Image (cartoon, coloured by chain):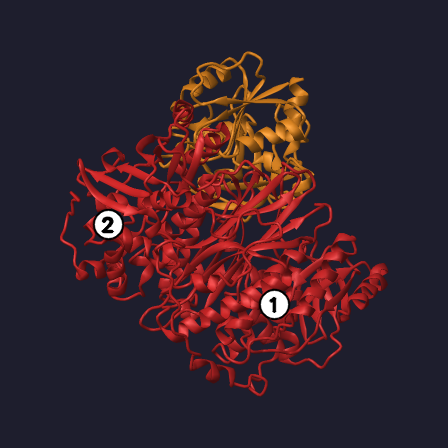
Amino acid sequence: MKFGIVVFPGSNCDHDAYHATKKNAKQEAVFMWHKDTSIPSDIDCIILPGGFSYGDYLRCGAIARFSPIMNEVINFANKGGYVIGICNGFQTLTEAGLLPGTLLRNKSLNFVCADIHLKVMNNSNIFTSKLKTGDIIRIPIAHGEGNYFADDDSIAMLEDEKLIAFKYCTKVGEITDESNPNGSLNNIAGIMNKGRNILGMMPHPERYSDSQLGCNDGLKIFESIAHSLK
Amino acid sequence: MGLFSELEVSLQTAYEVGLTEEEYNKVIEFLGRIPTYTELGVYGVMWSEHCSYKNSIKQLKTLPRSGGRLLVEAGAENAGLIDIGDGYAICFKIESHNHPSAIEPFQGAATGVGGILRDIFSMGARPIASLNSLRFGELNSDRTKYLLRGVVGGIGHYGNSFGVPTVAGEIYFDDCYFDNPLVNAMAVGIVKVGRTASATASGVGNPVFIVGSSTGRDGIHGASLLASREFDEETDNMRPTVQVGDPFAEKLLLEATLELIKSGSVVGVQDMGAAGICCSTSEMSARGAVGMFVDLDKVPLREPGMSAYEIMLSESQERMLFIIDKNKVEIAKDICKKWDVPITQIGVITDDGLLKVYRDGKQVCELNADSLVLGGGAPQNDLPASKPAYLDIVNNVNVDTLDLNIPFNEAFTKILTSSTIASKRWIFEQYDSQVRTNTVSIKGDAAVMRLKELPNKGIATCTDCNGRYVYLDPYKGAMIAVAEAARNVVCVGAEPLAITNCLNFGNPFDPEVYWTFKQAVGGMGDACRALNTPVTGGNVSFHNESRERAVFPTPTIGMLGLIEDLNKICSAGFKNENDTIYLLGNNRQELGGSEYIKLFYGDVVGKCPELYIDDEIKIQKVVLTGIRKGLIKNAHDCSEGGIAICLAEMSILSELNIACNINLPWELTPGILFGESQSRIIVCVNQNDEMRLEELCNKENVECFKIGKTHKVQFNINDKISFTVDELRNVYVQAIPSIMK
């Protein structure tokens, strides 16, 4: 299968996503430029990578959402195409209206880069198909605005329809305030749309996709996608 | 001449731009006339210490600055370049941004990071790591907390957004830095050998371009005035001399610069940092022995009405000066268009060696470029030096006879939770340490980075300087800074290759300060020669003082080490139960300048610890060999806080909560537990490997003491100091956050 990785000006995890999908998950991967006005027909899954698109001096992702490629990404997703937004990519997906809610500043008001644990809340989707519901994985976060917020109805909808992909948890899987690194409602770390073809997550699976870096729990997400779309 | 001067120039105006009477007369002698106001400003900034090293270069020339794996001599280019084999080189440098950070901590620190990153990528290298070295007053005042919060925020803001991992650093809190904190930023990059760019102008008729941001009034006289004076009641008024950083613009500038260099269209390139257009045009011209015609009317400006003087001296960030091959201009313009980076021609290379600058159609400068720069006309001073009176007073305090009478458990906890020793997690969690997915470990004595370009090879890097030792003995203290930096990269399994340095001192015209400077440079040079780690370049920062006091002389070392096999690396945290713990090196019970004495006596006094460089070389050889043979499982340099703190850190850093049961074979004294003798490393081996380690030590004549075993949970030293790992970790990790709340 083939991943298409969007490069916005200010993306800085684009090459990391490329390395993880190409070298670690051993799939095809190409970059897609933000000024492009079409998406190659052979792309199976689009990645919106982490970084600070357009500097993120306004709300994170608020400008990226208006770049030419995003019209195509929105069309692609609305037709059922698979899209994963990581960190700044998740922020961009909420700005584009492809996912509900928004990412506020961390409760601590500081940027935080740390290893955290995630509980897999749902595996009946292409992104976590090789994991089990209830699995605990270790993946790092690195963000200043990762505090997931949505209105009560949206949160209830996400919970009821099992659209929450990951929640922050302790090493042994307890979903507690102490294990919540940024103040996200219900410890939400990643969510899907109703069609389950779009995933947004704040943690960086591409950073832990290589045993040389001490952990490859993140690779399971790219392998799930590859396995599902092969 | 037909030269235009905005203001009449006199000795008084010369003083205002930071020149002395002697220097002003030298300018007149060079020119054979009175300079224009713009020319005077150019001399003021180019002959500042920051740009010309006029008061330090004679000393710096005594350092080992070539040979070995150095691909360029120190100072010849924007940053140092070290051959790591297989066709690649590592480019690295450290620089200070102390004064800007003292008056505007967030932007001061942020632009310090931005400036050093540009030095790396203007060489054609892609930045792969950022480090820092910070000094503040005691963390008990609102001002210091404000500075710390701002500096850490600024470093994170710039590096995180730019997309370079911040992987290592060091920080000390001492009263002497209260008015004048130190913010030293280091960057490391990788480049193919032979694919670097040079900061040299050449080729008559080649066009000169500004690439990057427009030019505003920020940062005028940052180098000549702000960086060249002590702190006083005027300092706050100088906030406008601090630049404002835009990491997004720098990220685009990075990508455009690397692509330009790769395209073959670039003849030469230099970062516009201190002294902006003025410094880059004159230095590049002087290096290439060419002249340059510069039309300031072409420079994109942020605001109307800027004078020639202001445009020449502006330190607006995220700009580069490019000399482009005249036949490849379109290639260069296309690349800049792709990245949405402005590119504007402002001049052309000429053959007369003169820097001719125009504004509003009038010529405002006609200077010999060579007369402006280091190695050309810039002054080179050897200032008076005399041994400081304070040395005898502080050295003569006999710390061994002080009856401080602190119970060991209490002393241990207080040291473990002092701001200088306690966990810096509150700081480093605000830095993205992993972006670019090359960070293998930040849990040892130095950061370990892989190189995707070279499977299995890696680098180790760290910053080091205990200014307290340098204060007590500038020569020996500077040697220790080099030795400890080398020891730290050895402890993760790397061979020390080379250093970059950032020399932070007080006012050089104070003979006592200058004496410490000369001594420290001497010690650094001797240590570098002995350890075979030449100096690749760096930065001098004088005038780090207020009316109250000068900072401790603080020659910060940035060390680069090479790892041949990334499977043979080592971290500090205990890995397994039942391993055997050894202390390697001599235990001399030296408490002078220690954290123990500082905390419980209340001052930095005593004698600097000894450094026997031959012992240092031997212990580094043993530990590097042991790690490469897979024999040593953990290694941790025994430094501030001594054996007790070293062992506590090895337990706290253990991911599996492995602690240790220690039986030191000596009567417990503060000197044994908390003394800071140099050239000591605590290592851990499998119990079946005890003989192998002892033989290795015997062969190299390194003292080795079996001091205990690792085991689960309980930390214990001679039944006198006893805690669980969780207890230790909690107090260690919470100490700084609880102050910063």
- What x and y, as percent, mark residue B722? 67, 71
Q: Mark 2 lies on which chain?
A: B
Identity, as a three-letter code, of the amino acid under mark 1: Ser
Return the x and y of residue B575 as percentages of the image width and height: 73, 55
Asked if both marks, 2 and 1, belong to the same chain, the answer given is yes
Mark 2 surroundings within 10 Å by alpha-carbon count, few (fewer than 14), some (14 through 19), many (20 or more): many
Instruction: Name the residue tied to disc 2.
Output: B39
Q: In which quarter of the image is residue B233?
A: bottom left
Q: Name the residue under label 1.
A: B639
Horizontal arrangement in the rendering, residue B43 relative to residue B83 (left or right): left
Of B17 and B59, nearer the camera is B59
Label 2 close to label 1 by CB (< 8 Å): no
Badge 1: how crowded within 10 Å, few (<14), some, or many (20+)? many
- Tint applied to chain A in the drawing: orange
User: What's the amino acid at mark 2?
Assistant: Glu
Q: Nearer the viewer, mark 2 or mark 1?
A: 2
Q: The red chain is which one?
A: B
Q: Is residue B566 above or below residue A72?
A: below
